[in-house]
Image: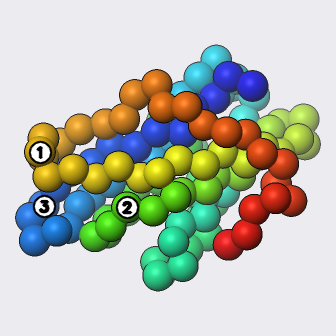
Amino acid sequence: MDLRLQNTWDYEGDEYWNWSAFLTGADLPKVDFVEYILHPTFTKPVRKIREASNGFRLETAGWGSFDLKAIVHFKNGREELLTHEIELRTSPKHGSTHDESVSPMPPASFSV
């Protein structure tokens, strides 16, 4: 599977960031939708994104880093779980992760 889960950040000050997570990779056209599982302190910690044109981008905001989980639902019915530690920096104030390695795992091996 050629998919990577990445994130961008925009530091707003007072230890608060706007950030987004998205998929990149050659297998992106095979994806039907992505179900993101955020930290349980988020309002609506499970979010389903169906918009493929922007890499199934999730946009949100928060104050801390955590392991984001993404269940990738493929058009053929297969599912893969990707994880990515959300990276939030104060310097530079704006940035993104690139070429992060992710570990695909069977969906049964994760917990919310």
User: What type is the residue that disc 3 sits on?
Assistant: Glu
- Residue that mark 3 sits on: 12
* Nearer to us in this view, 65 or 94: 65
Residue 18 visible: yes
Residue 31 versus residue 83 in the image, above or below: above
Tell me which numbered mark, 3 or 2, is placed earlier along the sequence.
3
Could you classify mark 2 by the number of other residues whose Cα lies within 10 Å: few (under 14), some (14-19), or many (20 or more)?
few
Q: CA distance from mark 2 to mark 1?
A: 15 Å
User: What type is the residue that disc 1 sits on?
Assistant: Ser
User: What type is the residue that disc 2 sits on?
Assistant: Ser
Residue 52 in picture, x, y percent from top left: 59, 37
- Residue that mark 2 sits on: 65
Tell me which numbered mark, 2 or 1, is placed earlier along the sequence.
2
Q: CA distance from mark 3 to mark 2?
A: 15 Å
* Nearer to us in this view, 36 or 48: 36
Could you classify mark 1 by the number of other residues whose Cα lies within 10 Å: few (under 14), some (14-19), or many (20 or more)?
few
Secondary structure, mark 3, is strand
Identity of the residue drawn at 86% across and 59% down: 108
Q: CA distance from mark 1 to mark 3?
A: 11 Å
Residue 64 versus residue 36 in the image, above or below: below
Secondary structure, mark 2, is loop
Viewer-side label of 1, 3: 1
- Residue that mark 1 sits on: 91
Residue 27 marker: none
Residue 30 in picture, x, y percent from top left: 75, 28
Residue 16 versus residue 70 in the image, above or below: below
Identity of the residue drawn at 82% across and 59% down: 109
Residue 33 visible: no
Determine the residue located farthest toward the right in the rendered image. 77
Residue 10 in picture, x, y percent from top left: 20, 50
